[in-house]
Amino acid sequence: MKNLLYLAIAFLVLSACSQASPEEEAAKAAQGYYARLLDNSPEDFLKGRVGADSLPEAYKAQLLKNYQQYMEEMVETHGGIREVRVSENTGYRDTTQNLTYVFLMLCFNDSTQEEVTVPMLNVSGEWKMK
């Protein structure tokens, strides 16, 4: 009986620990959006922005062009982006602005790295880039 009680307590502790924090969820979403940009899908990257569906078409076209130019610049200066990882500094929440800031590491093909900060907002249960 005692072993069963210990097993139940261990199960409860493990299940409580397995739920991702809001910071981790936001970081995973941001990483996914950047992965779409790496996969040459700037349209999907744009869909990850807050309010992207209500942007004027001309502005959307300009943003898509900017994303493409950014990726071309990364190829010229660093040989391209090899990988996007969630930084060890997962993120922090700003409850005043209702934002979660996540940190991503852009790993370039020339072995350099750059940490970027991505403000994320939870919109109806879905994390979007601000």
Image (cartoon, rainbow, N blue to C red):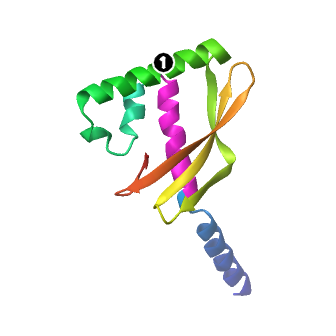
- Quarter residue 19 falls in: bottom right
Does 40 appear above or below 129? above
Is 69 placed above or below 27 here? above
Residue ranking furthest to the top: 76
Measured as percent of width and height from the top left, residue 101 is found at: 56, 52
Q: Is residue 20 visible?
A: no
Which residue lies at the image location 26% right of the left edge and 25% below the top edge?
58
Range shown magenta? 23-39
Query: Looking at this view, is 16 or 120 the one in front?
Result: 120
Please indicate whether residue 113 sits to the left or right of residue 16 in the image: right
Residue 97 on the magenta span: no
Please report the residue visible at 31 percent of the width from the left and 29 percent of the height from the top. Answer: 60
In screen coordinates, is 1 left or right of 18? right
* Residue 94 locus on image (x, y percent): 53, 61
Label 1 amino acid? Gln
Residue at disc 1, secondary structure: helix
Q: Residues within 10 Å of mark 1 (few under 14, many from 20)?
A: few
Q: Main secondary structure of the magenta part?
A: helix
Task: Provide the residue designation for mark 1.
Answer: 69
